[in-house]
Image (tube, rainbow, N blue to C red):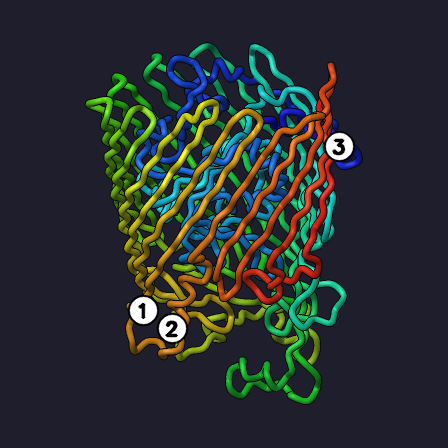
Amino acid sequence: MTSLNKTPLAINAATCAFVAVLTLPAPTSAQTGELGLYPEFLTAEGEQSKIPEVLTTTRLRQSKLKVPGTTTIITGDMIRDLGIMNLVEVFRLVPGMVVGEYGSNNQVTTYHGTSQYEQRRLQVQIDGRTAYKASLSDVDWIAIPVALENIERIEVSRGPNAAAHGINAFLGSINIITRSPYDTAGAEAYTSVGSRGHLRTFTSVGDSSEEGSWRLSYEKRKSNGFDRQKDDEKEKFHDGFDINNFNFDSLLAIDNDHSIDFRAGVVDGVNEEDSEKSGKLESTTNPDIILDTYYLQTRFNGAISDSHFYHLQASYQNQRRRQRWSISVPADEFIQLLPPGAPFPTDQGPFVADLNEDAEESRLEFELQNTIIFNPEFKLVSGLGYRKDTFDSETFFNGRGNNYQSRVFANAEYSPFNWVTFNAGGNWETTTTTDEGYFSPRVATNFIINDNHAIRFVFSRAVRTPDAFEQDPDWSYRPRNVQPPFEALEGIRFEVKDLVDQSTSTFGEELEEETITSREISYFGQYHLGSALMSVEVRYFNDYLRDMISGVINEEDWYIDNNVAVDQEGVELESSLEFSGTLLRATYAYLDQDSRYTGDPDKLPPSTQSRAVDLMGRLSARHSGSMAWIQELPWSLTSSAAFYLAHEVRGTRFKRADFRLARRIDRRNFSYVLAFTMQHYINMEPWMSPDNIIDEPNQYFVEAGIRF
């Protein structure tokens, strides 16, 4: 298929000025082989594989015929050819995943729901680096430090993957693999503008040689958000964002058997929060979030022989958010929060002060992985991992805290005959959030038919431990700039545990781990239809989730507990048809969930118990799917059409059709592309939240790009 990114894209020149570049060179993709980013995913014979290969599910490079589970592969070319405007929308192409926004335009994606709005049960990695937050295991998709133009492919392992990636890979794992700097040498730039204040620009420069390669890139993401709130008379719903993302990637070849991979990045900007939608405690100003994030990652790759590889990886990331706002609480309401007999008048105006939810989180992570191919029939990957999460917040933790995790993992692939493959693996992990250790196993048998078809039988178990904020919060507010007559309360702690509903509060109670037992029967096959290639993957799953943590966490209610059990089963389909100049792709997912309250029946009233059960399926869609068509046309044109649907998430339905037409021109020393995209909302009902209002059914975007 023609890829618009192969003509990289081009510029809003005013957005980028690269003044200095630190150049760490890097090996070519031929030199990296098993050691690097696997940009070509080659067979052992060096020819491009007709059967897709995946890396994420077991940490071994495996054919889909042998991998122990269902994995969706979304290529960077497909993302760009479909005109997808932000990273989170890529996951509409994954069966069983739901995408939307909550609060003030905060992006969210889940697999099989089983969460409220935080993606606490998905492992998300960028080039092997854990990307979710340290305190609430959530993913800030608005500020995620990767540009669409730099993505080589995304692999989504559907089903518990804790056996390979640890505790948070409870329902699945997402691995975002970026393009090798060797493949992006030169200069490229891109810009797109469109409806609701959409602006995205991208610029990169880089070089490559026999010794190595490097790339420095900059991306800006900007949006005005939704048009308005429900019943809002204001002209503008304050929910946009403006993000800057800098990334540096490099590869250095030491010799034919050793290389070093170094990456760094900085993200900053603002995520707007509307006071009427997201304000707390009678806020009078918008509680905008100022973001400042950076990361460093290095990986040493080594080869002892052609069949024995290893890597040692270290990474550090720091995420800071500054969120402050003013409040005005009527004195008679505020005094109810004070100790009895507090000598403050009720007739001299409201309590006026500034509050904050500032927080800083960091993660230091080490990993050693060893891969041995004993022979074509037996392969083994194993390793060790260590992680330290640090959080510092006057509001959420009353200071500084740490959590530690250590893990040992392994997976063996054994193919005694060419018609069967066995996989067995597991992960043993200890964490200080519960001061216990947990083992997550997976076993699978793949029956391979005619080298083009396989039937898989997979059994896995996984745990997820409560994260730092769920398990050990010390949430309080310290008012600043307090106005008379309450100035004596300057800096005094008001603890949330004293503010929440005491009749239902579970604040401070110790939580236990969640567990899932999953069974999968799946089929993958390829059919050669003349010059066309059709691929089909079908997954049936049956999951038992126990001791699930559900409930509400906010300054008025706090009743989370291990109080819900979920039984779920369903069927997922992913298919594609490729022939000269054409790609057709379709997905569908059906999910049936049965949830029930399993907590202490005397702890919560019946209505609150029902809400805890409902929250567990808040983002679960019974029916969801997508269809896409990418077509090469005469006159250097490429068109694409896509349709996305999801039914019954919080009583709402999502239906949208996207259309894109692009023209790419190649010249001797440069190439450029022009494109037009339209998103047509078939269902104008606000999706996921009544405040997610878009006034116009048609949204328009114009793109332009150039590469030298």
Instruction: Say which residue label 3 marks.
Output: 11
Q: Residue furthest right?
A: 14
Secondary-structure class at tag 1: strand
Secondary-structure class at tag 3: loop
Residue 110 position, x and y percent, is 46, 52
Q: Residue at x 35, y 46 (%)?
A: 167
Depth check: 192 or 494 in front? Answer: 192
Which quadrant of the rendered structure holds the N terminus? top right
Q: Residue furthest left?
A: 416
Query: Is 343 left or right of 309, judged from the image as shown?
Result: right
Classify residue 67 by image quadrant: top left
Q: How many marks?
A: 3
What's the mark number on residue 597? 1
Give how far apart the Cα atoms at labels 3 and 1 are. 54 Å
Depth check: 333 or 184 in front? Answer: 184
671 to 403, vertically: above or below = above
Q: Residues within 10 Å of mark 1 (few under 14, many from 20)?
A: many
49 to 202, vertically: above or below = above
Classify residue 152 by image quadrant: top right
Which quadrant of the rendered structure holds the C terminus? top right
Query: Which three-letter amino acid code belongs to the residue tagged 1?
Result: Tyr
Q: Residue at x 55, y 37 (%)?
A: 295
Give how far apart the Cα atoms at labels 1 and 2 are. 7 Å
Q: Residue at x 57, y 60 (%)?
A: 687
Query: Is 330 left or right of 706, judged from the image as shown?
Result: left
Q: Are marks 1 and 2 in contact (CB under 8 Å)?
A: yes
Residue 185 position, x and y percent, is 64, 20
Q: Residue at x 74, y 41 (%)?
A: 702
What's the mark number on residue 610? 2
Query: Which three-letter amino acid code belongs to the residue tagged 3?
Result: Ile
